[in-house]
Amino acid sequence: MPEELRPFTEADIDSMPVLVRRRIEAMVLGPMIRAFQDEFGEQEANRVAKRVIEEVAQNQGAAFAQKVGGDDIPTYVANKGAWTANNALEIDVLEMDEKRYDYNVTRCRYAEMYRELGMQDLGFIFSCGRDFNFPAGYNKNLKLTRSQTIMQGAAFCDFRYEMRQESGAG
């Protein structure tokens, strides 16, 4: 079948750099969320958008683990290229081993893109809001701690992942 007639598949979407996906999403979702804000109030519209994005992210994290065939930190790190493609993120890795992955994002083209689109406030919901739920879907024991983001005006984002063992009952 000629390339131009081949059905579009999820694998095609997965091969896109995430920065490109987020721009496409923002160009559709941004005006929609703005309309919902006007109609229902900013707080209520943002609350619903945040909830939906978090659910989507958790489901995507679970699908990612299945796709890459693992749910440990080294597998997670080795397969995160789509997020940094096109120099979307500049990071300084501080620590990485079987139990920890700590890094700082020192440049975020996602934040730059949302600012350019006049959607910095929504950028946190659309992108940064996924950051905790995606790893939770990937592995329920993978915990992220982050205290600041470039999107919210900080000089860098501080990502601290830790693989914790869930304590069993009894």
Image (cartoon, grey):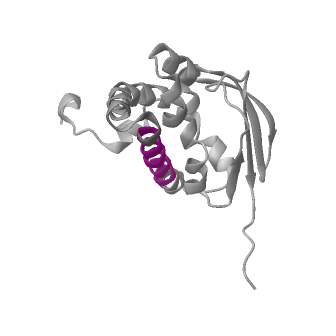
Q: Which residues are magenta?
A: 45-60
Q: Within the magenta stretch, is there residue 46?
A: yes
Which residue shows up at 60% across the image and 50% down it? 135
Q: Within the magenta stretch, is there residue 114?
A: no
- Left or right: 47, with 34 as reference point: right
Residue 9: quarter of image: top left
Of 71 and 104, the residue lying toward us: 104
| The C terminus: image quadrant | bottom right
| The N terminus: image quadrant | top left
Of 101 and 145, the residue lying toward us: 145
Residue 103: quarter of image: top right
Of 76 and 42, the residue lying toward us: 42
Could you say where residue 131 lies in the image, as x and y percent from the top left? 59, 42
The mark tally for this picture is: 0
> Please, what is the dominant secondary structure of the magenta stretch?
helix
Which residue shows up at 73% across the image and 21% down it? 155
Q: In the figure, 108 relative to 147: above or below?
A: above
- Of all residues shown, which one is farthest toward the top? 116
Q: In the figure, 6 relative to 165: above or below?
A: above
